[in-house]
């Protein structure tokens, strides 16, 4: 397995691998046109920022500043959803255009918060339901 820099183009990666995928020239052109390109014409890497990185900001500030910084996606921290209200937060995030890559904090399985095992499981189930509503990739 070889490492490929995210800055390498798809053509460069294929050339480095020495593989021919059997795609004809016209098929390759349509594949190339459908790739997400940066303003410089290079393939773009999805950039996601987790809300714990900006812990002191509100959910609204996170979305506003992430958009200004051209960050494509957000890793959601559940306490920030609760601060605004889960339903309102979910609606706000879905309308923002940011992709939700993850929903953080489920359960507290280490026992340090004093929750019972059933409470921990209930919280984890709620985190999964929230992730589903946000179309998140993972919890």
Image (cartoon, rainbow, N blue to C red):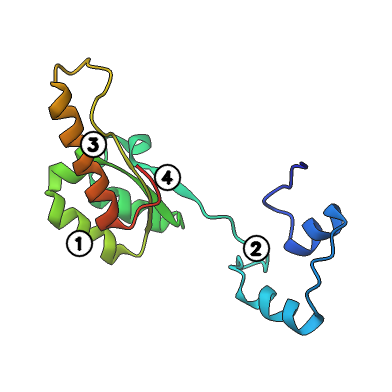
**Mark carried by residue 49:** 4
Disc 4 to disc 2: CB gap under 8 Å:
no
Q: Nearer the viewer, residue 24 or 56?
A: 24
Where residue 55 sits, quadrant-wise, is: top left
**Mark carried by residue 91:** 1
Q: Would you call the spot at circle 2 few (<14 residues within 10 Å), some (14-19), or many (20 or more)?
A: some
Mark 1 residue element: helix
Disc 4 to disc 3: CB gap under 8 Å:
no
Q: Would you call the spot at circle 4 few (<14 residues within 10 Å), some (14-19), or many (20 or more)?
A: some
- Residue named by callout 2: 43
Marks 4 and 3, how far apart at CA = 22 Å
Q: Residue at x 79, y 66 (%)?
A: 21
Marks 2 and 3, how far apart at CA = 36 Å
Mark 2 residue element: loop
Mark 3 residue element: helix
The answer to whether residue 52 is left or right of residue 116 is right
- The nearer-to-camera label among 2 and 3 is 3
Marks 4 and 2, how far apart at CA = 19 Å
The answer to whether residue 93 is left or right of residue 88 is right
- The disc, 2 or 3, on the residue closer to the chain's N-terminal end is 2
Q: Residue at x 68, y 80 (%)?
A: 30
- Residue named by callout 3: 124
């Amino acid at each position: 397995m070889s490492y490929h820099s995210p800055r390498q183009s798809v053509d460069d990666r294929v050339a480095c691998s020495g593989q021919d995928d059997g795609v004809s020239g016209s098929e390759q052109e349509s594949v190339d046109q459908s790739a997400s390109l940066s303003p410089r014409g290079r393939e773009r890497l999805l950039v996601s920022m987790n809300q714990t990185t900006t812990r002191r900001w509100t959910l609204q500030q996170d979305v506003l500043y992430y958009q200004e910084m051209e960050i494509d996606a957000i890793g959601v921290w559940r306490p920030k959803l609760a601060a605004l209200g889960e339903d309102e937060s979910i609606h706000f995030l879905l309308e923002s255009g940011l992709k939700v890559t993850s929903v953080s904090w489920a359960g507290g399985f280490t026992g340090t918060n004093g929750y019972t095992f059933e409470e921990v499981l209930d919280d984890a189930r709620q985190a999964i339901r929230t992730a589903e509503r946000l179309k998140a990739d993972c919890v």
